């Protein structure tokens, strides 16, 4: 029980009886195990438990005991969070009979193969169990109980079933609801009569990690997004299209071929046609019940390569022939290369040195210092074309951190900045600047503005004195990357000093719907396009990224490079990655600190933490820091080495 449940977690025990369903609710694991064994030994066909944590209030229905008939079962709304992705592999056989030994072993073997397949894609070790008739894989996850998580789990199961279900073994796609009941291991599976060729078996856990590691959210998204979307209609103009015949003649190597879903068909390919390295069930062709075709590859580099792209790859010019139009041949190769690359882009070592000399000289006037000497010494400044990404959970103070940076830059009176505030409107941005400039609370600023203790003009002058006239703000929400670049152009025209930084609050509010159909694909494209923007405009980019908060996680714990959703894409495009957390957040103390972690530093060391005084009431962050190395040794103003 301790493998599945955390201490004190409430779970429902449920089993069929002659009168319906019996069971109870338990927060004592030893009593839960004893009650499950007693029900199984008494002849219950199956004994189940809820996998995900149940609201403690339900314990009052029948606390740590069993009743013969339960009137109300745990509903999806009664679940606190999602802790498990449940994968059930069951042999295809007639209803209400146990599996043969051969069927049983086939399910276990598929579970072993599926586990290895996911491990090769960086998934952690699962709990593997024998359900009595088939096999179970349980992957630890950490998701809220909401519609988005329900859809994510559903699509993950459907994506796995698309690649793994066959005529012998079915991967159950219905196990996506939060209150799903699950086999209670250590109890009997009794379907039908106990026959020599179809015996009853005891369910059991076969293996479990010593410490369950959660599947990162971006890996769940990657798997879910690999499920091809059903086209609205068949995509081939003209006469009916014979997809099975097309697959047969295509020359594509198929490793699994069979029915799929309700009236569909699927072909799992040995290798992705776009990249031969994408092997081992990565690519799949689907024929939907409508007759429409779709294609998908699991790997992010194949995002956007759909059925139309696959058919054009295998059958060049098919669309023109179907429409009766001759295909236009590609123009001959020009004598001089055209497009984004020129001969002058191929550089010798001396040309590299010249570029470096230009870069170093430009840093003296254009690099961005954050305003905290110890931290700036480690990062060595954010130069034109570089991206600094800051990740934090909500309410930790990432926007306050950003506005402190803008204030520090403004005080130097040498560089203009642009703040794209998509979360906070202009009036809130101003009030927060006033808090920083006057070291007052937001409430005090508002009262002074209204009552006239300090005139509105006096508050305005304090802000202008702190920031200068060259700290610019755009509060338009839902910007696309192209809009942000246009804002940079406008700001450059307005700025009284060279524009050195565009700060964006925050990544999740940038509109990427024009870039990709999936959230992961949109995020990947957005961060890559922001990196390109930084290079084109020769400007530094500071990007805030909000980390999803797990239940019970208040932002007091350190982060890792994997903390952010779609963290792989975010980390890849960042030159610097900082993580923020506050150990005493919510403690009701004025002695607060904000911790700044250097999670990635393209110019030098990472792994250090910097500790700054933080006044949450006024949003001010002190300039003096302690440097904490990876062994948690503190050196005032020191320099920590990895």
Image (spheres, rainbow, N blue to C red):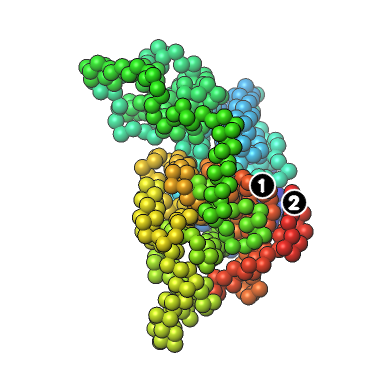
Which residue is depicted at the point 62% across and 22% down?
A: 102
Question: What is the crowding at mark 2: few (fewer than 14 residues within 10 Å), some, or many (at least 20)?
Answer: few
Q: Is residue 65 left or right of residue 284?
A: right
Q: Identify the residue under disc 1.
A: 604
The quarter holding residue 123 reads: top right
Q: Identify the residue under disc 2.
A: 641
Q: Residue 448: x percent and y percent?
A: 44, 83
Which residue is depicted at the point 76% across and 62% down?
A: 635
Question: What is the crowding at mark 1: few (fewer than 14 residues within 10 Å), some, or many (at least 20)?
Answer: few
Q: Is residue 368 above or below residue 267?
A: below
Q: Is residue 587 above or below residue 168?
A: below
Examine the rendering and report whether any part of residue 69 can be seen: no
Disc 2 to disc 1, how far (Cα)? Answer: 10 Å
Which residue is depicted at the point 37% across and 60% down?
A: 494
Q: Residue 196: x percent and y percent?
A: 65, 24
Mark seen at residue 169: none
Q: Residue furthest left?
A: 324
Sooner in the amino-acid sequence: mark 2 or mark 1? 1
Q: Is residue 362 above or below residue 372?
A: above
Which residue is depicted at the point 48% across and 55% down?
A: 501
Q: Is residue 638 left or right of residue 497?
A: right
- Tell how many labels: 2
Q: Nearer the viewer, residue 379 or 38?
A: 379
SS for dot 2? loop
Q: Residue 195: x percent and y percent?
A: 62, 26
Q: Nearer the viewer, residue 596 or 379?
A: 379
Q: Residue 379: x percent and y percent?
A: 62, 52
SS for dot 1? loop
């Amino acid at each position: 029980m301790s493998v599945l449940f955390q201490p004190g977690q409430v779970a429902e025990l449920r089993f069929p009886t002659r009168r319906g369903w019996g069971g109870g609710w338990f927060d004592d694991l030893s009593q839960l195990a004893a009650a499950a064994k007693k029900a199984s030994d008494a002849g219950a066909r199956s004994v189940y438990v809820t996998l995900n944590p149940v609201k403690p209030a339900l314990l009052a229905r029948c606390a740590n005991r069993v009743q013969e008939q339960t009137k109300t079962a745990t509903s999806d709304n009664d679940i606190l969070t999602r802790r498990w992705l449940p994968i059930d592999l069951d042999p295809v056989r007639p209803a209400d009979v146990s599996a043969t030994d051969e069927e049983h072993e086939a399910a276990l073997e598929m579970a072993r193969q599926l586990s290895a397949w996911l491990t090769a894609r960086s998934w952690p070790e699962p709990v593997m169990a024998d359900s009595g008739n088939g096999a179970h894989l349980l992957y630890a996850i950490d998701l809220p109980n909401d519609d988005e998580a329900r859809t994510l789990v559903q699509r993950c199961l459907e994506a796995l079933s698309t690649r793994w279900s066959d005529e012998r073994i079915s991967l159950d796609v219905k196990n996506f609801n939060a209150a799903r009941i699950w086999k209670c291991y250590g109890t009997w599976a009794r379907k039908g009569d106990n026959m020599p060729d179809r015996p009853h078996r005891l369910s059991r856990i076969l293996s479990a990690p010593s410490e369950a590691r959660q599947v990162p959210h971006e890996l769940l998204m990657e798997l879910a997004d690999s499920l091809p979307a059903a086209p609205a209609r068949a995509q081939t103009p003209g006469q009916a299209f014979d997809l099975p015949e097309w697959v047969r003649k295509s020359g594509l190597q198929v490793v699994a071929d069979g029915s799929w879903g309700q009236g569909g068909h699927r072909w799992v390919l040995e290798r992705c046609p776009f990249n031969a390295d994408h092997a081992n069930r990565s690519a799949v062709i689907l024929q939907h019940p409508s007759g429409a075709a779709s294609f998908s590859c699991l790997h992010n580099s194949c995002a956007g390569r759909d059925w139309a792209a696959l058919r054009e790859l295998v059958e060049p010019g098919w669309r023109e022939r179907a429409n009766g139009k001759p295909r236009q041949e590609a123009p001959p190769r020009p004598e001089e290369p055209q497009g984004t690359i020129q001969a002058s882009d191929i550089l010798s070592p001396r040309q590299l040195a010249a570029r470096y000399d230009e870069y170093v000289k430009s840093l003296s006037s254009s690099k961005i210092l954050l305003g905290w000497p110890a931290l700036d010494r480690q990062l060595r400044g954010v130069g034109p074309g570089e991206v600094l990404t800051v990740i934090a959970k909500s309410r930790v103070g990432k926007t306050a951190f950003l506005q402190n940076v803008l204030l520090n830059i403004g005080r130097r009176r040498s560089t203009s900045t642009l703040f794209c505030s998509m979360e906070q409107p202009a009036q809130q941005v101003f009030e927060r600047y006033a808090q920083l400039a006057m070291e007052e609370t937001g409430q005090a600023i508002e009262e002074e503005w209204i009552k006239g203790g300090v005139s509105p003009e006096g508050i305005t002058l304090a802000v202008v004195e702190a920031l200068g006239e060259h700290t610019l703000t755009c509060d338009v929400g839902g910007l696309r990357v192209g809009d942000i670049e246009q804002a940079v152009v406008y700001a450059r025209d307005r700025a009284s000093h060279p524009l050195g930084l565009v700060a964006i609050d925050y990544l999740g509010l940038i509109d990427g719907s024009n870039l990709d159909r999936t959230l992961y694909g949109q995020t990947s494209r957005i961060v890559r396009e922001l990196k390109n923007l930084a290079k084109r405009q020769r400007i530094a980019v500071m990007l805030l990224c909000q980390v999803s908060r797990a239940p019970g996680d208040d932002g007091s714990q350190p982060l890792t490079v994997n903390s952010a959703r779609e963290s792989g894409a975010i980390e890849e495009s960042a030159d610097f990655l900082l993580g923020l957390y506050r150990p005493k957040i919510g403690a009701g103390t004025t002695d607060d600190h904000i911790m700044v972690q250097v999670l990635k530093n393209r110019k030098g060391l990472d792994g250090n933490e910097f500790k700054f005084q933080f006044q949450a009431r006024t949003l001010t962050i002190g300039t003096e820091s302690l440097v904490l190395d990876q062994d948690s040794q503190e050196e005032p103003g020191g320099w920590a080495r990895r």
